[in-house]
Amino acid sequence: MEQKKKYPKTGSQLTYIGEFTGLYYMTFKEYIAFYRIHGDVIEVARVLFSRSDYMKVLFGKSEYFLEDYED
């Protein structure tokens, strides 16, 4: 995490429906840490098991099945 402190934007940007969500993420073993950058502060938003439907946990719907939810 010390490396993230020096270079916070080296994580991957999380996009949802083609838009940047303001969240970055990084993986560690079987987990994904989601974080935001506020100036020189890193705020950890969630840490989730990588095999979970993390898009559904974060946004209420899975990005891959949005057509199933649209009217």
Image (cartoon, helix red, strand yellow):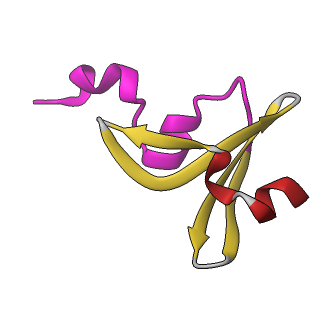
Quadrant in the rendering for residue 16: top left
Residue 14 shows in this picture: yes
Left or right, 8 with respect to 66, comes to: right
Residue 1 shows in this picture: no
User: Which residues are drawn in magenta?
Assistant: 48-71
Quadrant in the rendering for residue 68: top left
Q: Farthest residue in the left direction?
A: 71
Query: On screen, 69 above or below 60?
Result: above
Left or right, 39 with respect to 40, comes to: left
Identify the residue at image location x=50%, y=36%.
55
Quadrant in the rendering for residue 66: top left
Query: On screen, 40 above or below 4?
Result: below
What percent of the width, then of the height, locates residue 60? 43, 44
Q: How many marks?
A: 0
What percent of the width, then of the height, locates residue 20? 38, 48
| Front in this rendered view, residue 51 or 71 | 51
Indicate whether residue 64 is drawn in magenta: yes
What percent of the width, then of the height, locates residue 27? 76, 35
Indicate whether residue 55 is drawn in magenta: yes
Identify the residue at image location x=58%, y=50%.
24
| Front in this rendered view, residue 43 or 48 | 43
Identify the residue at image location x=52%, y=47%.
58
Query: On screen, 40 above or below 57?
Result: below
| Front in this rendered view, residue 35 or 12 | 12
Look at the image and tell me in which quarter the C terminus lies. Answer: top left
What percent of the width, then of the height, locates residue 1? 87, 55
